[in-house]
Amino acid sequence: MGHHEPEAMSAGCRAHANSTSTDPRERRWLCRRRRKPATACIRLRAAWLLMLVMMALASIPSSAAATVLPEQGIYYGCSINCEAGLDAARAAGLSFVITPPSRSVAAALQARGMSAFWNVSYRTPRPDLVQEFASSPTTRGWYVADEPAQHDAGAAQWWTQQIHAIDAGHPTLSVHFGCSRSQATGAMRPFKDVADWLGTDCYPVGPGSSRVTGPSFAGGAAVAAQYGRTFWAVTQAASWAEMCGAACGRTEVAWPSPREMQIMRDCAAAAGARVIAWYSLDKILSGGERRLQDLATAVRSPQLGCPR
């Protein structure tokens, strides 16, 4: 992606913001009534969202609702006071997060029956964190690289070797930009012996473009299979303008519609993705209640297949 973002927030060519950023856009909460505590406001929204989701599910035929989809989670650049955001994610139907290692987050996830792929980038290797969280019941794996540059393959490989020496029971994951099989091949080949799971993303989604970006997951899956790696996918749930926009050479400002997100989800599922991770909860929370509802609709809707 050509950007050097703290890995807690990254996946695709998007605006890079540290999870401890003071950017007011990253700190906005859902409730406009300032007299209420922020966490209480988000919990209220999460409860309201859950009710809407359950009402929507009740109208789906049982045969459609039973369709099996890959497990879905979301990026979350949070390390403290994350409970309200996790409630919103859980209400939307998400079961895991990609986030920095944190004892408080681990405890909050366990209380909600959720799990984490801990963000431990090769850029800032922390063996002590791997050692601490290797035995946590919430640990699903280690997220080691987000669209890394080819010349970083050696550093990433060294780091994943250190992780495997400490924790042989959980996989390492990396994601690479790939809007075509040739792009995926070029980005993934240097890392074919690095991460256990190789994933792709393809941004941005604009009006109608999900029918182009969605099927690109098939190319990434084919490359991962060629190298004997598990394939996973990162899908876009936030406005491109919020994530990167003109800084990445594109000007799309609209948020993806539920249908556009569903197309990306279904195409990732059709490609055989082991899990699907949406980007990102921080951006969606800043977008308000409607964006949470749109995400829940995309996450929970029955499969309609990948457009060709």
Image (cartoon, rainbow, N blue to C red):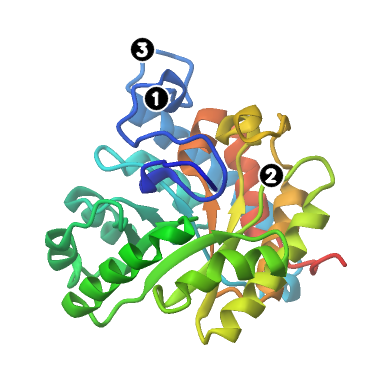
Identified by mark 2, the residue type is Pro
Badge 1 is on which residue? 27
| Residue drawn at point x = 71 percent, y = 69 percent | 181
Q: Is residue 145 left or right of residue 304?
A: left
- Is residue 142 among what the camera can see? no
Q: Residues within 10 Å of mark 3 (few under 14, many from 20)?
A: few
Instruction: Pick out the residue farthest to the front.
Output: 151
* Corner quadrant of residue 139: bottom left
Q: Earlier in the sequence, mark 3 or mark 2?
A: 3
Badge 2 is on which residue? 204
* Corner quadrant of residue 98: bottom left
Cα gap from disc 3 to disc 2, whole angstroms: 37 Å
Which of the two marks, 3 or 1, is nearer to us in this view?
A: 1
- Is residue 270 among what the camera can see? yes
- Disc 3 is placed on an element classified as loop
Along the line of sight, the residue nearer the viewer: 28 or 125:
125
Q: Is residue 153 above or below residue 239?
A: below
